[in-house]
Image (tube, helix red, strand yellow):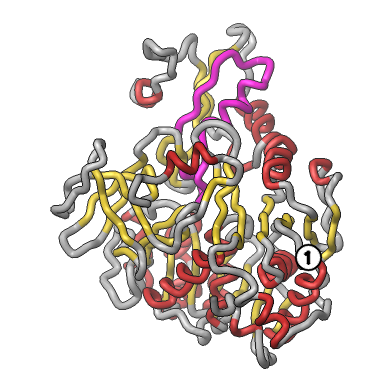
Amino acid sequence: MSSLFPALTGDPGARAALRFGDRSLTYAEFATAAGAVAERVRGRERVAVWATPTPETAVGVVGVLLAGAAAVPLNPKSGEKELGHILGDSAPSAVLAGPGDALPAASAGLERIDVEVGGRGPVAEDVEDLSEDRYGDGDPALVVYTSGTTGPPKGAVIPRRAVATTLDALADAWQWTGEDVLVHGLPLFHVHGLVLGVLGPLRHGGSVRHLGRFTTEGAARELNTGATMLFGVPTMYHRIAEALPGDPELAKALAGARLLVSGSAALPVHDHERIAAATGRRVIERYGMTETLMNTSVRADGEARAGTVGVPLPGVELRLVEEDGTAITAYDGETVGEIQVRGPNLFTEYLNRPDATAAAFTADGFFRTGDMAVRDPDGYVRIVGRKATDLIKSGGYKIGAGEIENALLEHPAVREAAVTGEPDADLGERIVAWIVPADPQSPPGLEELAGHVARRLAPHKRPRVLRLRGALPRNDMGKIMKRALAHG
């Protein structure tokens, strides 16, 4: 295959590659730093990366890819139990981190390799050779852990082919070139922030300015000083919509942007309209998953139709199917079906889970997304919900209810637990914990349970609402009926 990062080979030059706050690297500096990492991890199968929003994460991940190994991004906010599962399941031979990063006890048995952004390693032909024919395009690039609806997170093995084809398809859809400067404040331990938000600019020869933590002021500053694209999740765009009436600088910044992209969950139409009215610019949406990277997008040269995720990207086959698996052939904008996709953008397997991998695919190779949608006659896709009720989209994250329930049940004051999502203007959905207390006279409080969950999993998985019940509704098989909870 061709190099994943052609801009790092040959003569990378003094063009800006990335900037995090007041720390920046040119392409030449980035190439030598990533080359130094590649030298240290060459020959390994998987290497974990402590994925803080820093240049070290970007250099570390790219260095692992240049060495032909697979990077396992770690969420620095993960609880010990979740982190222990991920490290035990993926079995990396080392963990990359910034020199000043304090790593948790779960990583104590791993070799630690500090990433030096001033490091120097082989570049030009050596680096290009490392990322080309010596490593097949089906070889793993990343193992990204995704929360399932039950049980611990599963590691989706994403091949090099999927990274390259997705980023090239987005370049086609968004007219994304080396002239673009991307700004975002997304975490770097999942697909949106890492693959699209860091590897994308590096593949296309552009640059990225990472805000560290998203603020409307930071986005406005960067867009008013040369940035051309903004990536965000609905929570961020909701905050932008709220701030616009009193912030003319923000309105000016968005009006001057070439492309505003929202993803990871549906952006409410109300926020679409408020942003468009204040700036004259429409936010476009795309649709993807950890297992598939990107499947569809509104095109830069197409209609930015609020509430839709556009059309299939080049190379992606998408179909809607009935509950019995029959393909829906007449697209009328009303008939709901499950989205199934096939193409070079797909993951290859769930690590160590052949059962889950087999269940995820149809006999003819389509991936069952579990997302329900309708499709207009002109091909536009509109997501309408989950096939199951156990996936919550909150603040741009996809969160499995099962692991939160398991964490809640570890609390001594909890007898039974169920977790659902409900609409939230800021987060998209907020996490609701339905609890049967062990002692009805002394029930646990929301703050206590939220802290309990955040320590075990991650802060964004904590419940925001607590509802106490004397019993949870169950069917004859003993399964909790969540729809009955949500509606009564």
Q: For the N terminus, give its image quadrant.
A: bottom right
Q: Is residue 156 above or below residue 378?
A: above
Q: Position of residue 335 (x, y in %)?
A: 18, 46
Q: Which residues are magenta?
A: 393-420
In the rendered image, the vertical position of residue 475 relative to residue 39, given as above or below? above
Amino acid under disc 1: Val
Counting labels gives 1
Left or right for 111, reference 343: right
Residue at image location 43% in from the left, 18% down from the top: 479
The image quadrant of residue 59 is bottom right
Q: Secondary structure at mark 1?
A: helix
Q: In the rendered structure, does residue 5 fall within the stretch colored magenta?
A: no
Residue at point 71%, 64% (across, down): 57
Q: Give the residue at x 43% y 76%.
A: 171
x and y percentages locating residue 319 in the rendered image:
27, 53
* Residue 203 appears in view: yes
Q: Quadrant of residue 17?
A: bottom right
Q: x, y (%) of residue 95?
A: 78, 55
Q: Which residue is mark 1?
A: 41
Q: Where in the figure is residue 26, as x and y percent of width and height?
A: 70, 84
Give the quadrant of the C terminus: top left
Between residues 127 and 183, which one lies in front from this camera angle? 127
Q: Residue at x 83, y 41 (%)?
A: 105
Residue 194 location, quadrant = bottom right
Left/right placement of residue 116 relative to residue 14 reads right
Q: Nearer the viewer, residue 354 or 56?
A: 354
Asked if residue 215 can be seen in this view, the reply is no
How crowded pointer 1 is (Cα within 10 Å; few <14, some 14-19, many 20+) is rated as many
Is 400 colored magenta in this rendering? Answer: yes
